[in-house]
Image (cartoon, coloured by chain):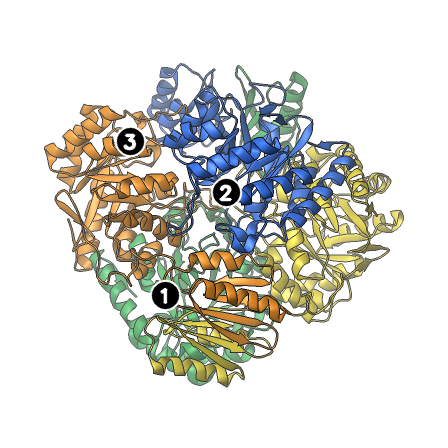
Chain colours: A green, B yellow, C blue, D orange
Amino acid sequence: MIISMKLHATREEIDEVTAIVKHFGYKVHSIEGEERVVIGVVGVGDVTPCLESVESLPQVDSVVRISAPYKFVSKEFRKGKTRIRVNGIEIGGEEFVVIAGPCSVESEEQIVGLARKLKAMGASGLRGGAFKPRTSPYSFQGMGTDGLKLLKAAGEHFGMPVVTEVMDPRQVELVDRYADMLQVGARNMQNFDLLREVGQTRKPVLLKRGMSATVKDLLMSAEYILNEGNAQVVLCERGVRTFEDSTRNMLDMSAVPNVKGQSHLPIIVDPSHATGRPDLIPAMARAAVAAGADGVHIEVHSCPERALSDGPQALLPPQFAAVMRDMRRLAEGLGETIA
Amino acid sequence: MIISMKLHATREEIDEVTAIVKHFGYKVHSIEGEERVVIGVVGVGDVTPCLESVESLPQVDSVVRISAPYKFVSKEFRKGKTRIRVNGIEIGGEEFVVIAGPCSVESEEQIVGLARKLKAMGASGLRGGAFKPRTSPYSFQGMGTDGLKLLKAAGEHFGMPVVTEVMDPRQVELVDRYADMLQVGARNMQNFDLLREVGQTRKPVLLKRGMSATVKDLLMSAEYILNEGNAQVVLCERGVRTFEDSTRNMLDMSAVPNVKGQSHLPIIVDPSHATGRPDLIPAMARAAVAAGADGVHIEVHSCPERALSDGPQALLPPQFAAVMRDMRRLAEGLGETIA
Amino acid sequence: MIISMKLHATREEIDEVTAIVKHFGYKVHSIEGEERVVIGVVGVGDVTPCLESVESLPQVDSVVRISAPYKFVSKEFRKGKTRIRVNGIEIGGEEFVVIAGPCSVESEEQIVGLARKLKAMGASGLRGGAFKPRTSPYSFQGMGTDGLKLLKAAGEHFGMPVVTEVMDPRQVELVDRYADMLQVGARNMQNFDLLREVGQTRKPVLLKRGMSATVKDLLMSAEYILNEGNAQVVLCERGVRTFEDSTRNMLDMSAVPNVKGQSHLPIIVDPSHATGRPDLIPAMARAAVAAGADGVHIEVHSCPERALSDGPQALLPPQFAAVMRDMRRLAEGLGETIA
Amino acid sequence: MIISMKLHATREEIDEVTAIVKHFGYKVHSIEGEERVVIGVVGVGDVTPCLESVESLPQVDSVVRISAPYKFVSKEFRKGKTRIRVNGIEIGGEEFVVIAGPCSVESEEQIVGLARKLKAMGASGLRGGAFKPRTSPYSFQGMGTDGLKLLKAAGEHFGMPVVTEVMDPRQVELVDRYADMLQVGARNMQNFDLLREVGQTRKPVLLKRGMSATVKDLLMSAEYILNEGNAQVVLCERGVRTFEDSTRNMLDMSAVPNVKGQSHLPIIVDPSHATGRPDLIPAMARAAVAAGADGVHIEVHSCPERALSDGPQALLPPQFAAVMRDMRRLAEGLGETIA
C-alpha cells in the first residue's frame, strides 16, 4: 500500500498517518520528494481496514493498493487450474464444455424435446430457468419448483448435468435439491447474502459477471463464495453495459485471459446474453474457443417465437448445431477437444 | 408497439407476425413502405408478452415499445405528487428533507453523539448501516441487530425517523421492526425477491438506483414494490458507473427532473456515494436543491479517520453544517424551505 | 511516481528498473516488502517519458503517477481564478454568464430576431454555428462564412460577444476574424492540431468536454492550448456518453467543483447538449448555478420545428425567459449576480 | 420513420405533424390507438431532415428511424464484400491480413530492423506512427516527415505496404505521398473535415472506431469518406471506453460480425490498443481470427522498454512470432489462410 500525502502536508499530519499505519501492525517507509511525501506500507495480511482508515484523512491525497484484495481466488493461493466436476462433466479441465438450453423451462414436452436434440448435437450440460429475474414484474417469472423438477428429470434422462439460477437465499436449499450447478445471475453478483448461502452448499456455482462489474469485482464476489468453504466456482463472462445500443450488452472477451492471468478458477462465456442477437452468437462462440475459455453457455429454443422470455437471444436447434460444428473445427485447429 | 419487418420479408412472413399479434388480442395496422413493411399494434394492456414473442422472429428487424412498460409508478396512473410520511417527516411534500448519518452504526456513543449534532444542525432523518453490502468479504460487514437497536434508540431520543439498509429477504421482518424506512441499496436494485418482500411491508422504502441502471430500470424496480401493494417508495439517485475515474460514480443530476416527468414518486439525491469525495459533496447537495430534488441523503462522521467503512466519502460535522447553511440559502432563494 | 515490481522479481530485474529511472535524472527509494519491491521515484520535472519507458518492462507490475500530468492549467501553477474577458463580458469573474443562441445560424432574420430577444431576456453572449460537426454527411452542415458574417453583425448590433465553433485547423484564421470566442467542440477535444492552432491565436477559447473524456483528459487538452501561449481557456461540461438512453448524454455536474479543485480555469455548463431534452434543461441550468459554475451555454430557437439541426434540444424564447428568471432568483439566494 | 405523438395530442397538433411530413415529400399512414396516435412515414430518400424537424415539436413523444441512416456503406447498396488492394496485399479477400509495426517510427535502424523481423515472421503490412496523437503535450509527438520517409523506405525494401496515421487535413497531401494506406485514428473518427479530405484521395483508408463511438457512428463516419468518392475504407475495432479499469479499453469483438451484417466493408481488429496489455493480446488476436475479422493490427517493438510512446502495449518480436503461429493454426482449423 502506498500513501501519497497532499502537497505541503505538515510534519504533524504525516506523523498522524504513520501512527495509524503502525497501529495496524505495518512497517512504514517514507519517501520525501521535492514536492510531497509518499509513505510505503509494508507487512503481511489484508490491508483493507488500514487502507480505509487512512484514505479518509484530509491530508492524504490518494492511497494505492499494491497487492490484490482477494486471496482464495488468486493464482498466488493456488498455482494450477481448478477443475470442477459437475455430475459427470468437468469444467476447467482438458475439454471445452458446452452448456445449452432454453431461457426458461416451460413444459415437460419442451425441455425433454430440447434436451434430446441438444444431447445429440453435442452439448454436455443442460441449462434452464425455473426462477427468472425479470426487469418487469409483468414478464413471465418462471415455473418455480415445477420447472426444477422437469429440468432435473430431463437432465437425468439424457445424462446431462443441469444448471439453473437461484435468486433468493431462501431458495438455495430448494434449488440445491434439484440442480447439479447453482447459477448466480448478473443482477445478483453482489447480492452478498446469496453468495454466502451458495458458499455454504457443496454444489458447484456458476457466477455470472454483473452488468457493471469490473473483473476485479467479479473475483471479489467469487472470493465471498470461496471464503465460505465452497471452492467450486466457475465464472461466466456475459457482457457488460455500455453506450453501444445495437447489442444487448458488450461482451468483454478479454475478460477470459484477464481472469486466467489472476485466478485459478475456470471461466466460460455466454454469448447469448452478451449480444442478445442470434446473428452474432456464432462468431462470439467461436471467439470464446479461440480466446481460451473453458466453455460456453448458450440459449437454444425449439420455437423462439413462442418463448415466454428472452426469445430474441436464443438460437434455433439447427443454428446451434452449426455453432457446435464450428467450435469443434476450431478446437481441433488448436489441438483441443470439446467434451 | 411498432414492428419493423426486415427488408424483403415475404407475405407469409408478415402474415405470421400479424397472426401472433392478433393471438394476443391486439389490432394490427400495416404500413407498406417502398422498402419494408411496418406493423402498428393497437390495444390496451401490457404488451410485454406479445413484444417478447414477436421480437424473436427472424423476419422481424426491430420492435419498438410506444407506451411505458410500468403502470403504478407512472404519472398516467396518479396525477399529483406522492407524499410519503416517515414517522413524523414528509418526503415529497412542501419541504426539502435532509437525511444524514454515518455509513455504519459503530457504537452507542458514536450514533448518539452524531445524532445529537445532526439534529442540532437541522437534519430531519437519521441514517446508519447495520447490515453492510461490501465488495470484499474482508471489509467490516456491520453490527447487525445490535446496530439496528442502537440506531432506533438514537432516532427515538432525538425525534428523528431512522433509515437503514436491508439486504436479504430474510432480514426484512427484523429490519422492519426497528427502522422507520427500509433502504434497498444500489447493488440490490434488481434483487427482485427483496423488492417483493419490502413491497409486502407497510413501511416506506428508499430505493437506490443501481450502478448501471437506467432511469427506466429504476422505475421498473419501484413498480415491483408498488405492485405488491406498498406505494410508499422514495427513489434515490446515487450515481452510476462510467469511465470517469476521478469520482466514485457519476451523479446523474438530470435523473431528478427526468423521474419527475414520468412518475409521481419523490426522488432524493445522495451526493456522498455518488461522488465519494467530500470536496464535491457540498456543490452537489446545493445542485440537488436547485434541480428540484425532494431531499438529500448525506454521510457524516464525527471521526472519519476511524470510520470502519467508507470513511473517505463522509463529511465532518462542521462541513455538514456549512452544507446545511448553503442549502437553506438556496431554498429560500427558490421560495422553499428545508424541513 | 511509484513503481511496483512483480512478485518475485529478481535483483537484476530491479536493478534494470532503477538504472532507467536514474538515467532520466531521478532519485530512487526502494521499499522491500515481504512479497514485493516498490520503487519510489523522486525529482522534479515531467515524469511522462520515464513513466512510459518503465511501464513497459515485463518485471514491472504497475506504475502510479503521483503528481498531476499537467502544469499550466493547475492550481499549483496559478493560485487565483483566471478571469477571461470576451469582448465586454468576463467569464470566471464575479458574475454568472449566460451564452445563448441557436444551434446553427440560418438566416439574417433568424439570428437578428433571436439575438434581440435573448439580449432583452438577459443573455450576455450569443452563440451560433456556422460550421457544424454532424454525425451524418447528409445532415445540414452549416452556412459557413456567410453564417460567420451574420453572427458577427448580430452580435455587434446588440452588443453581445459571439461564440462559434471551429472544426478544422485551416478554418481558425477565418473564424478568428469574425468570432469573439472560438469554440472547440466535443468531437474535437482531442484534435491536437486544432488545439495547437487555436492556442496560437489571441482569442478566448471555449473547450467542450469530449463524449468519453475524463476530467483529467479535458484538462490535458486545455494544457495543449495554454502550452502554445493562449491562457484564455473556458472549459465546458456538456455531458458524456453512458448506457443511459433516455437522455442524449449524461451531464456530469460534479465536473464543476472537480475542475475548480484542480484548475484556475473557469468552467461553464451546457445543459442543452448534455440532456438533449428541453424538459430537463431548466433544472440543469439551475443546478449549474448552484454547483458553482461560471456560466451556462443554452440553445434557443425561435421556431424549433423548422430548425435545420438539433431542434429537439433547443428551448423556445419563453422557456428561456423562465430559465433566466429561475437562475436569477437562485443567484440572489447565493448572494451572486448574473451578468 | 415512425412518429409517436404524445398522449392526448390534439387533432390540430397531429395535423401540424402530417403537414410537415408531406412538405418533405413523404406519405403518411396514421394509426390511431386507444391512447395515442402513431404516424408512419413512407417514401424514398434520406429522412434525416424531416426527422430532425419533426422531432423538435412539443406534441411529438419520439421519432424512430426505420431505415439505416447510411447508404454507400450498407449491404443494400453493395451486396458482396468489398476487397481493398493496398499496394500488393488485399484486405477483405480470401486471406487474413496481419499488419504489424512499432507505435512510432523512431530511427532508421529501428524501423528497418523491425520490418525485417516482422516480414520473416509473416506480417503482410507495416505500420508505424510519424504524427502521434498524444493526450499530453509533453509526450513524444512523432518524427513527422522524417518518420514518413523512413517508414516508406523500410516498406519498399521488404515489400510491405505501409500504414500511418494522418491527424490534420493539412497533412493529408504529405502523408498520401509516403503511405500506402492512410490511418484515421480513434480520436479523429468524427473529425469530419479530415474524413472529407481523406475521402478525396485515392488511397485506402484505415478508419479506427472512436472511444465512445457506436457501430452505427463508425459506419456513419465511413459514409463521409465514401460520400467523397473514396470507397476503399477498412474499419478497425480498437476498443471502447468503459468503467473497466484493468484494461486500457474494452475490445468489442462482437463489432466484427455486427459490422459484417450491415456493411460490405472489411473490418480488422487492433488488440494492442484495445487491451493495452501484452498478456491479453495473443488471446484477442486468436479470437479475432475466429470471429471472422479480415485481419489484425498489432504493435510490436524490438525494445519496448526504450519505446518513446505506448511501450506497454507492444509485443516483443518473439511474442509476436508466437501469436502468428497461433493465428495460423486457427485459420487452418477454419479452412482459411493468412496472407
The residue beneath circle 3 is D171
Could you tell me how far apart the alpha carbons at marks 2 and 3 are, in whole angstroms?
A: 30 Å
Q: Would residue C200 be found to the left or right of residue A29 on screen?
A: left
Could you tell me how far apart the alpha carbons at marks 3 and 1 are, in whole angstroms?
A: 38 Å
- Quarter of the picture holding the N terminus of chain D: bottom left
Do dots 3 and 1 share one subunit? Answer: yes
Residue A300, percent from left and from top? 38, 72
Which residue: 44% across, 34% down?
Answer: C166
Do dots 2 and 3 share one subunit? Answer: no
The residue beneath circle 1 is D44
Q: Would residue D312 be found to the left or right of residue B135 on screen?
A: left
Residue flagged by tag 3: what amino acid is it?
Gln
Helix, strand or loop at disc 2?
loop
Of D18 and A155, nearer the camera is D18
Labels 3 and 1: the sequence-earlier one? 1
The residue carrying pointer 1 sits among few (fewer than 14), some (14 to 19) or many (20 or more) residues within 10 Å by Cα, namely few
Residue A219, percent from left and from top? 48, 49
